[in-house]
Amino acid sequence: MSASSPFSQIAVLVVDDDAYLRKIIRSLLVGFGVQRVYEAGDGAQGLELLHQFKPDVVLVDWEMPMLNGAEMIRLVRNPETSPHATVSIIMMTGHTERHRIQAAMQLGINEMLVKPFSAKSLLQRLELVVNYPRPFMQIGNYFGPMPRPARGAASFGLGEMSQS
């Protein structure tokens, strides 16, 4: 993609303790046209780079040493203490248990990316947070993006299904 890429003006921070995976993600992002990609090996370094570079999107792994992804997101999504509370966050995880997905949503993530993921899946999540941002809301202890409108079965490629 050239400088005319819709992603050429954004900065992305990749926070994952797996250096090889960070390198792969960086290559994919650059291929999508992202020109500024920053990398952190844990949540604590991720917070430092978030404050230093103010990226538009943060890709963060759930399981990391020191400060894990959930702890990092809790700190970022606190509008009283974080100047970056509305940054777009895509959670990366190999944990697909229902309680984990619900916990990630309650943390205020914008999107979820299940490992291992394809380039297409990464591009789709990036397009959602960049091209279709959701307004933020605060209800009780929750601060994060408003839920997306419910999609019908047809939009998931399931064809016609009766609604009862």
Image (spheres, rainbow, N blue to C red):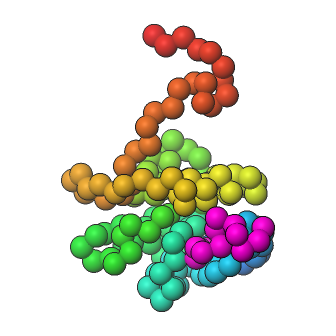
Q: Does residue 3 belong to the magenta stretch?
A: yes
Residue 138 left/right relative to 157: left
Along the viewing direction, whichever of 88 and 140 lies nearer the viewer: 88
Along the viewing direction, whichever of 99 and 145 lies nearer the viewer: 145
Q: Is residue 99 visible?
A: yes
Residue drawn where x is 65% and y is 73% of the image = 8
Tell me where residue 34 appears, x and y as whole percent: 67, 73
Residue 119 left/right relative to 128: right
User: Splitting the image into 4 quarters, where does residue 71 fall?
Assistant: bottom left
The N terminus lies in quadrant: bottom right
Tell me where residue 86 appears, x and y as whole percent: 38, 67
Tell me where residue 92 appears, x and y as whole percent: 60, 60
Query: How many numbered discs sit on the rendered protein?
Result: 0
Residue drawn where x is 53% and y is 69% of the image = 57
Along the viewing direction, whichever of 76 and 41 lies nearer the viewer: 76
SS majority, magenta? loop
Residue drawn where x is 67% and y is 28% of the image = 157
Q: Does residue 119 belong to the magenta stretch?
A: no
Residue extending furthest left? 140
Residue drawn where x is 47% and y is 81% of the image = 54
Is 86 drawn above or below residue 95 in the view shown?
A: below
Q: Can residue 17 be seen in this view?
A: no
User: Splitting the image into 4 quarters, where does residue 2 fall?
Assistant: bottom right
The C terminus lies in quadrant: top left
Magenta-tinted stretch: 1-15
Tell me where residue 30 appears, x and y as whole percent: 74, 73
